[in-house]
Amino acid sequence: MTARIIDGKHIAAELRGKVTDAVHRMLRDRGLVPGLAVVLVGQNPASEVYVRNKSKAVTEAGMRPHDHHLPASTSEAALLELVAKLNADPAVNGILVQLPLPEQIDAQKVIAAIDPAKDVDGFHPVNAGKLASGLPALVPCTPLGCIMLAKKVHASLAGLEAVVIGRSNIVGKPVAQLLLAENATVTIAHSKTVDLPSVCRRADVLVAAIGKPEMVRRDWIKPGATVIDVGINRVAGEGGKTRIVGDVAAEVSQVAGALTPVPGGVGPMTIACLLANTLRAACMQHGLPAPNIGS
Ligand code: NDP
């Protein structure tokens, strides 16, 4: 058996198309253009690529980017001042501060300073708490994308055994909350989990968010399971070039029923969900109904 490949690029393009249509309708009917502020501090090369891609996607969706690139020496006070300005700016509907931040800045303090209504990354404790309480919230983008991909395979996740490897606030925990909200039976595994392979073999849906290249092997997989690979790991490839691999080994496709590729799986969904969250935030702030974009 060879697993069906879940085409994240295609599914993300569909979502981006729906967001773009909704943004055009918002402009036509209300004269409003959603705005997203992306804040980058320093010159982390991976972050620079992410931020560039995000701003480009915002423009392509018909929204307005507000880019702020600050030097690596920026103080915590200066960043908090910028966040306060963006919180107060009615043209800015979403605020994203790219992580990681330089060591002189406390990331938790900065996240907590963002207006929860503009927290399109969904990392603010208010949004995390709402998600955990089953209340409407701005939900982290990568986890949202994971659930959308899993639902392309399973119309309903109710009653399925789901295992999430990883418990970060950015991916593992919110993915687990979303799976629970979909009525899956959820196990969260982490570095202290005993006999991880046998825990994973229970999973109808396995989400790997570990950050360890190709750690999940074929004998960890229940035959026919759906495997969502969140990992983005840079490893040495041929001729000294780096190549990107996920947390799941390619051999898993021999056992799984469906699998997300890396690249081209969860990654593109993250940006599409960021656009969807920005639109959602703009609608909330203008007292409009939630956009009907199917996410
Ligand atoms: P973190 O490092 O914050 O969390 C990793 C989690 O994996 C931790 O909970 C850790 O457990 C667990 N873990 C580490 N080693 C093991 C092990 N040997 N066995 C079991 N569990 C283990 O990473 P993130 O959650 O931020 O990211 C995870 C991956 O997803 C990374 O590769 C990252 O690049 C990628 N990513 C991809 C995105 C996308 O858009 N596709 C977006 C965000 C992240 P413990 O808590 O016990 O330490």
Image: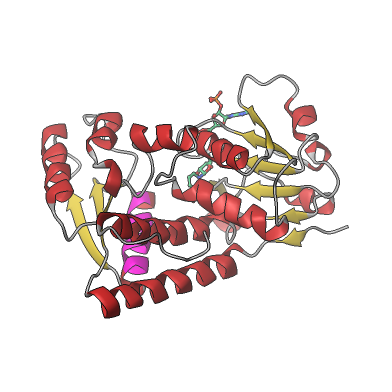
Q: State the residue in front, 74 or 1.
A: 1
Which secondary structure class fits the magenta region best? helix
Q: Position of residue 218 (x, y in %)?
A: 80, 43
Q: Residue at x 31, y 73 (%)?
A: 26
Report if residue 52 lies within the magenta region. Answer: yes
Numbered range of the magenta stretch: 47-58
Q: State the residue in front, 233 or 123.
A: 123
Q: State the residue in front, 207 or 132.
A: 132
Q: Which image quarter holds the N terminus?
A: bottom right
Quarter location, residue 56: bottom left
Q: Residue at x 37, y 67 (%)?
A: 57
Please determine whether, in this image, residue 109 is positioned above or below residue 240. Answer: above
Is residue 261 visible from the viewing direction of this image? no
Q: Position of residue 44 (x, y in %)?
A: 32, 47
Q: Residue at x 80, y 28 (%)?
A: 198
Q: Position of residue 236 (x, y in %)?
A: 57, 48
Q: Is residue 50 left or right of residue 12?
A: left
Q: State the residue in front, 282 or 230.
A: 282
Please determine whether, in this image, residue 5 is positioned above or below residue 158. Answer: below
Q: Position of residue 277 (x, y in %)?
A: 39, 55
